[in-house]
Amino acid sequence: MSHVRDLIALVKPRITLMVVATGAVGLYLAPTNPAPETKLGLLLGMTLLVGGANALNMYLERDIDGRAERTKDRPLPAGRLAPGIALTLSICLGVLALLWLGLVVNPLTAVLGLLAFVSYTACYTPMKQISPGALVIGAVPGAMPPLMGWTAATGQLDLAGLTLFSIMFLWQLPHFIAIALFRSEDYRRAGFKTLVSELGERTAKFQVVLYLLLLCPVSLLLVPMGIGGKLYLWTALLAGLGFLVVGVQGLRRSAGIRWARNLFKVSLLYLMVVFGAMLAGNALQGGDAPSLYAIGQDAG
């Protein structure tokens, strides 16, 4: 039973669930209603893909994990599982996921899944030990799920889907800077190059504010596309301003680990509230609101 728990731990189930949930948001916001098998196919394919990427990350960082207090008890650094098991599991899950997405959903979604898998495991994971620029690279695979949900339903890349990608991309940057601030000692022991360790806390906090200044207006771009309606408009505006206020508080000299932890918690709350408002606003509109996306489709 302990080996089963360790195998499950390799795929980081809580992270996988959160990522798949953001993919489901993109799927259900799309203007077309795909067949049930497409919906289930996307959710299953994404679960396999994210689980495979997480397992490969565990394999690649097994020695690094052993140096950090937070991760030293994971199955590989603790010696409870052989590294080859994690590698085999990750490759099998990744290949199966991509084939599944390509055959059951559509080739475009499978290509986006491949891009997410490769950028996370082959670019972001090793880059964390080389450059703080890994933060931006890592935000690409993290922002891909809602776009994949959108393309699963529509079969194409368009402005609305890319806006969902942009919202998720910008949200991750202050979210992960907050983590780097309150886990700076763990990251130092692991050898990760973060904004905090390489450029200092002050620069990292200014970047938090910059990304939040971008996030608020970008999140509102969905409204003229017919997504979310007035409920989403006011929710995203107020939530974005609230998130920004918390971020600006970090510029005070007295702002420390407690502020960073609060920023992290607020970032999670922001994502749940904003994505919830998108779904609720769309449900209230009943699909009757005019949208730039629909106008563009009609014109085509």
Image (tube, helix red, strand yellow):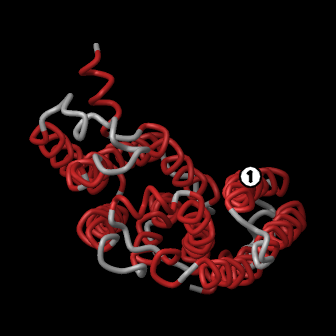
Quarter occupied by residue 137? bottom left
Helix, strand or loop status at disc 1: helix
Quarter occupied by residue 178? bottom right
Q: Quadrant of the N terminus?
A: top left
- Residue closest to the eye, 282 or 71: 71
Q: Is residue 121 above or below residue 131?
A: above
Task: Give the image location of residue 267, x and y in percent.
Answer: 69, 59
Q: Amino acid at mark 1?
A: Leu
Q: Is residue 189 above or below residue 138?
A: above
Residue 156 showing in the rendered view: yes
Quarter occupied by residue 193? bottom left
Which residue is label 1 attached to? Answer: 269
Specify whether 260 is left or right of 176.
Answer: right
Task: Give the image location of residue 122, x and y in percent.
Answer: 23, 68
Task: Give the image location of residue 211, x and y in percent.
Answer: 66, 80
Task: Give the image location of residue 97, x and y in percent.
Answer: 27, 48
Q: Quadrant of the C terminus?
A: bottom right
> Residue placed at 33% from the left, 23% from the top?
5
> Residue placed at 23% from the left, 49% from the top?
62
Query: Which residue of the protein is positioned furthest toward the top in this rendering?
Result: 1
